[in-house]
Image (cartoon, coloured by chain):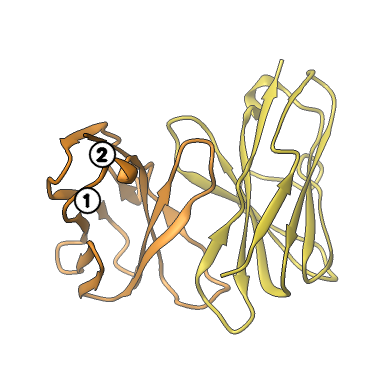
Chain colours: A orange, B yellow
Amino acid sequence: QKEVEQDPGPLSVPEGAIVSLNCTYSNSAFQYFMWYRQYSRKGPELLMYTYSSGNKEDGRFTAQVDKSSKYISLFIRDSQPSDSATYLCAMSASGSGYSTLTFGKGTMLLVSP
Amino acid sequence: SAVISQKPSRDICQRGTSLTIQCQVDSQVTMMFWYRQQPGQSLTLIATANQGSEATYESGFVIDKFPISRPNLTFSTLTVSNMSPEDSSIYLCSVVAEMGYEQYFGPGTRLTVT
C-alpha cells in the first residue's frame, strides 16, 4: 500500500460546481497537510497548509483533515475554468522546514465553461 | 513567498551525456530541495541541498548520478549524469524560506533523453 493515495482523474465538472478532491494516507505520523495546484508546464503552487484535524478556509477553497480516517479533502466552491489544473496533496510528520514531504500522484481537474 | 527560477526550462539530450540544472532564488533560504516528477508518478525527493556541505540523498538516489552543489543561500545546481531515457522527467527545485516551513517550488526543467 502506497503511503498516499490520490485518484488521478481526470475529474470534469461544469463551471460553478462544487469540487471535492481527496487523498488517503497510511502513515499515522503525518500531522501536516498541504494542497498544491499545478498548471500544465508549471511548478506546483502552495494553496493550503493545515495542521492536524479540522477545517481551514481560504476564499473559495476549504481544506479538511480527518486524522481518525486518515483522509484529507480539498473543496472548491463556485469552480472556474481557471481552476483547471492538477491538484497534489502532500503531507509530513513535522512542520519544520527540514521535514520531508510525501506527495500523492495528483488529480487532474477540468472545469468547463 | 520566494521567487524561484530554473535554467534551462527544457532540454533534449542524448544518452550518455550530462545536464546541469540551475536553481536561483531571489532571497536567502534555509532549505533547498531537488525533486523529480515522472509522468503519472508522485513528486519524488531526490536530495536536500545543504549549503557548505554534501547534499543528503534519498533512498534510490546517489551522488555519482545526481551531483548537487549549493555554494550559497540563494543558488543550487543539480547535474543528471550519464543520462538514459529513464531520466526523462521534470526536475524541480523547492525552497523553504528563512524562519518558514512551507515549501515553494520552481517552474521545473523538462528533460527528454533520446
Q: Badges 1 and 2: C-beta atoms under 8 Å apart?
A: yes
Identify residue for label 1.
A22
Q: Residues within 10 Å of mark 2 (few under 14, many from 20)?
A: some
Per the model, the C-alpha gap separating discs 1 and 2 is 8 Å
Q: Where residue A23 appears, x then y in whole percent?
A: 25, 51
Any part of residue B84 in sight: yes
**Residue at 32% in and 61% down:** A27
Label 2 chain ID? A
Location of residue B35 with respect to B111 vertically, above or below: below
- Mark 2: which amino acid? Asp
Specify the quadrant of the image occupied by residue B108: top right
Specify the quadrant of the image occupied by residue A15: top left
Q: Nearer the viewer, residue A99 or A43?
A: A43
- Mark 1: which amino acid? Asn
On whether disc 1 and disc 2 are found on a single subunit, the reply is yes
Identify residue for label 2.
A7
Any part of residue A1 in sight: no
Q: Where residue A44 appears, x then y in whole percent?
A: 49, 51
Residue placed furthest toward the bottom: B99
Q: Secondary structure at mark 2?
A: loop
Q: Where residue A63 appears, x then y in whole percent?
A: 24, 65
Q: Nearer the viewer, residue A80 or B73?
A: A80
Dot placed on the residue nearer the N-terminal end, 1 or 2? 2
Label 1 chain ID? A
